[in-house]
C-alpha cells in the first residue's frame, strides 16, 4: 500500500482519481481547504497543513491550480515535499503551455521547470482541455459571446484520472506523452451541441480574437493530435449530465 497525497482532490480529475486509488487499496489523503470525508485540511496559498499532510507520504499528485499563483503555490508544496522525503511527484499540466503566450500558461511552464529542478523524482502529464472548457469559455467571455476559428480536443476527467492512476503507481518518468480526447471538434460545432442540450444560450455572437495568444490557439498548439488516448466523446459527456 502506498500513501498518496492528492491536491485538487475535490474537483476535475481529482475526485475520480481519489476513488480509483482508494479502490486499489492505497492510503489516499485528499488535500483540501475544507473538512470532509478523507480530507486533510490545509492551504497551498499559505502552506498551512502541508507538513502534516505530507508526513509519511511517498507520492504526491499535484492537481490543484491557481490561475494567479500556480508557481508560488507549487514552490511551497515542493519545499514541504522535499523535507518530507517524498519519492515521486506527479503534476498535471496542459498541452501547449510552452507554445501559447497566455499568462496562465506561462506560469504553468515555470511550474513545470520548478518541479524538474526540485530534486524530487517527478512525472509531468499534459492534457488537453476538459469537456467543460467550452462552457467555461462562454462564462469568461460573457454568456452571449463565443470564439470562432478554434478547434478543441476535449478529454474526459475520468480518462485523465485513469492515466494519473497509472503514473502515480508507477515509477517517475519525467514528462510523458500528452493526453488528448478522442476527437477534435470545431468550436462552432461544440456551441451548437451545447445549445441543443440546453447548456448554452440560443443566441450567441461569435467573434475572432486578435493577438498572439489566439493565433497560437488557432494554430492548434493546444491539441495533442489524433488518435487521442481518451475515450469519452463530447456527446457522451453531454449525455451524462456531468458539469466537469
Image: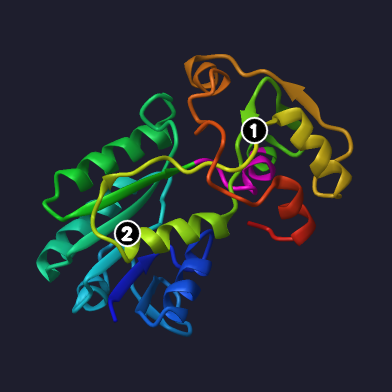
* Residue 86: image location, x then y, percent: 17, 66
Label located before the other in sequence (1 or 2): 2
* Residue 88: image location, x then y, percent: 22, 61
Q: Was residue 133 drawn as part of the magenta stretch in this picture?
A: yes
In the rendered image, the quadrant that contains the C terminus is: bottom right
Q: Residue at x 43, y 45 (%)?
A: 67
Q: Is residue 106 left or right of residue 226?
A: left
Q: Is residue 192 left or right of residue 38?
A: right
* Magenta stretch bounds: 128-137
Question: Alpha-carbon distance for marks 1 and 2?
Answer: 35 Å
Total number of numbered labels?
2
Residue 158 location, quadrant: bottom right
Q: Secondary structure at mark 2?
A: loop
Q: Which residue is mark 2?
A: 45
Label 2 packing within 10 angstroms: few (<14), some (14-19), many (20+): some
**On screen, residue 101 above or below 87:** above
Q: How is the protein colored in the picture?
A: rainbow
Question: Could one spot residue 144 in this view of the protein?
Answer: no
Residue 139 location, quadrant: top right
Q: Residue at x 47, y 64 (%)?
A: 14
Q: Is residue 112 left or right of residue 231?
A: left
Q: Residue at x 71, y 30 (%)?
A: 187
Q: Is residue 9 left or right of residue 180?
A: left
**On screen, residue 236 above or below 48:** above
**Residue 184 got which mark?**
1
**On screen, residue 15 above or below 227:** below
Amino acid at each position: 500500500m502506498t500513501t498518496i497525497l492528492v491536491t485538487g482532490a475535490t474537483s476535475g480529475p481529482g475526485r475520480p482519481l481519489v476513488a480509483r486509488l482508494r479502490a486499489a487499496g492505497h492510503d489516499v489523503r485528499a488535500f483540501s481547504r475544507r473538512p470532509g470525508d478523507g480530507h486533510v485540511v490545509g492551504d497551498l496559498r499559505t502552506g498551512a497543513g502541508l507538513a502534516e499532510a505530507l508526513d509519511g507520504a511517498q507520492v504526491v499528485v499535484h492537481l490543484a491550480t491557481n490561475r494567479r499563483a500556480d508557481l508560488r503555490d507549487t514552490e511551497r508544496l515542493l519545499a514541504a515535499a522535499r523535507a518530507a522525503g517524498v519519492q515521486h511527484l506527479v503534476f498535471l499540466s496542459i498541452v501547449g503551455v510552452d507554445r501559447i503566450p497566455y499568462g496562465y500558461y506561462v506560469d504553468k511552464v515555470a511550474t513545470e521547470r520548478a518541479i524538474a529542478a526540485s530534486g524530487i523524482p517527478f512525472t509531468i502529464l499534459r492534457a488537453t482541455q476538459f469537456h467543460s472548457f467550452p462552457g467555461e469559455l462562454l462564462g469568461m467571455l460573457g454568456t452571449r459571446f463565443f470564439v470562432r476559428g478554434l478547434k478543441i480536443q476535449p478529454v474526459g476527467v475520468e480518462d485523465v484520472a485513469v492515466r494519473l492512476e497509472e503514473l502515480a503507481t508507477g515509477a517517475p518518468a519525467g514528462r510523458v506523452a500528452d493526453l488528448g480526447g478522442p476527437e477534435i471538434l470545431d468550436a462552432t460545432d461544440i456551441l451548437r451541441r451545447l445549445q441543443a442540450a440546453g447548456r448554452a444560450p440560443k443566441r450567441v455572437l461569435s467573434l475572432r480574437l486578435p493577438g498572439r495568444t489566439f493565433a497560437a490557439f488557432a494554430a492548434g498548439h493546444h491539441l495533442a493530435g489524433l488518435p487521442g488516448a481518451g475515450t469519452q466523446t463530447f456527446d457522451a459527456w453531454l449525455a451524462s449530465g456531468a458539469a466537469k
